[in-house]
Amino acid sequence: MTLASASGARVAVIGGGLAGLAAGCALAGSGFRVTLHERRPYLGGRASSYQHPGTNEVVDNCQHVLLGCCTNLVEFYRRTGVADKIRWFDGLIFLEPGGRESVIRPSFLPAPLHHAPAFLRAPCLHLSDKLAIARAMTALARPVAEEENSSFLQWLQRHGQTPRAIERFWKVVLVSALNEDLDRVSVYYGAQVFRESFLKSRAAGLMGVPTVPLAELYAAAGNYIRERGGEVRLRSAVESVAGHDDRPVVAAGGQEFVYDYVLLSVPFNTVAGLLPPTPDALPLRQAAAQFESSPITGVHLWFDRRITELPHAVLLDRTIQWMFHKSDLLGRQGAPGSYVELVVSASRSLVEKSRPQIVELAVEELGEFFPLVRSAALLKSAVIKEVHATWSPRPGCDRLRPQPLTPWPRVFLSGDWIATGWPATMEGAVRAGYMAAEALARAAGVRRPQFVVPDLRPAGLMRFTG
C-alpha cells in the first residue's frame, strides 16, 4: 500500500485498542509521525492479556477469535507480521451434555450450500429444525434490511424457526458473535453475521484462534509504529483534548502536547470526558450516552490431567458457551494437565456472582461434556468479567453511530462503535481505525488514501444473490 509522504505531520492516537493500533499503524506506514497514548501498561485494550495475580499465569481477558470474512483484521495481522500466530480451523464442533458431537464443516458444494451436508448429518438438530434453518438461510442469502422495531429473535419467529433451532443454532452463533441476547439484536446485524460467515463462501467461515497471548500479538503493532519513527506511550492517561482549528492540544499526565491532528480511539462510555468543552460536542455526547454495553465472562481453569483432545467446542444447553483448550492452542501439548478457557457471552446472569460461585458452576457444567473433569483435580482458576465488554447491537443502533469526522477539523473519531457497518468485533474495530486514518490522511492532503480492505467476494451461487 503506497501513499505519498504525509510530510511528517504529528498525529496523536488516543487509545491502544485494536482501532487505535490499526489507525496508528496505517498512518505511521504512510509517513505520519504517530504518538500513541494508552492508559494501560499494555496494548490491545479489551483484547489483551496480562499476568493474573491470583494464578501467576498470563491470561487473555477473554478468548478472541476471527473468521475468514474479517478481511481488515487479517490484513492488520499481515501488516504487523503476526499472521503466522493464528491457527485456522474449518469446522465447528457442537457438543451436547453427555458428549455427543455434531461437526459443522464445509463440503464440496458451492456457496451457500457448502454447509448443507454437515447440517443434514448433525444429530443435535431434528429434521424439523434443519428444514426451518434452511428456510431462514434462504431468506438470508439476500441482503436483509434493518427493522428498527424488531429484534432478530422476532425475525426468526416470523420465519418459522423451532425452539430447538433457535437454542441450538441461531442463539449459539449469534450470542457468541455479537455478545448480546437475540431479543436485543438488530435484524441487520443478526443477518449480517450469517450472510458474511456462513453463506458467502467457504473461506469466509474459517475460524482463526491466536496461538500466543493477546498482549504478544498486539505488541507487534506497537513495534510497527516505533520502527517507523513513532512513539508509544504506555501508562499515559489522556485527560482532555482541546480541538483548536490550528493545533489540537492533548493533556496527559500533567503535561500538554501539541499535535497537528488527534485521533480519538476510545469506547463510547469514555469519549465524553475527552471531548473539547464546546457546544459542538453536545450531539456526540448525547449519541454516546444512548449506547448500552453487554458483558463477557471468561473462566480459566487448570486441571492436573488432560480432560479432552478437542482444541475447541461449542457447548449446548448450558451457561457455558465455548471451551478453548488453551494447552493445545498455545502449543503446550506435551505439558501435563489441561488449561482451558470457557467463555460466556452476554453474561448478565454472572455479573453479580462471586468467583467461587462461577468456578463451581463452570466445573460442574464442564463435567457434563467432558467426564474426565470429574476425576481431575482443579489446580487453580481465574474469572475475568468484562462488564462493559462491547456495545449492544440493538435494533436502531445505527442511527447513533457517528462518522470519523468531528466538528473540529483536526480531531477524528475511531473505535468499534463508530459507523463501520460492522458490529462490535475485532474486525469492526480495525475497520474503524482504518476509516478514521483515511479521513485524517485526506484532511492532511494525501490523495485517495486507501486503508480499508474490501469484503470477501461472494463465491458459488452467492455471486447471483445481490
Image (cartoon, rainbow, N blue to C red):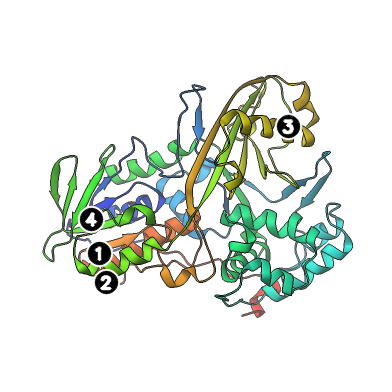
Q: Earlier in the sequence, mark 3 or mark 4?
A: 4
Per the rendering, the mark at residue 447 is 2
Q: Nearer the viewer, residue 365 or 84?
A: 365
Quick one: label 4 or label 2, which is nearer the N terminus? 4
For label 2, count other residues whose C-alpha is less than 10 Å away and answer few (under 14), some (14-19) or many (20+): few
Upstream in sequence: badge 3 or badge 2: 3
Instruction: Give the position of the N terminus as an image quadrant.
Output: bottom left
Sort mark 4 into few (<14), some (14-19) or many (20+) by Cα contacts within 10 Å: many
- Name the secondary structure under disc 3: helix
How far apart marks 3 and 2 lie (CA) works out to 59 Å
**Residue 348: percent from left, percent from top:** 57, 47
Q: Relative to residue 150, is residue 168 drawn left or right?
A: right
Residue 32: which disc?
4
At label 1, the amino acid type is: Ala
Q: Do residues under tags 1 and 2 come within 8 Å of each other at their CB atoms?
A: yes
Which residue was labeled with disc 1?
Answer: 4
Is residue 153 found left or right of 255 in the rendered image?
A: right
Residue 63 picture quarter: top right
Q: Give the number of the mark in front: 3 or 2.
A: 3
In the image, 383: left or right of 166? left
Mark 2: amino acid: Arg
Tell me which label, 1 or 2, sits earlier in the chain. 1
Callout 4 secondary element = loop
Query: What label does residue 364 carry, if any?
Result: 3
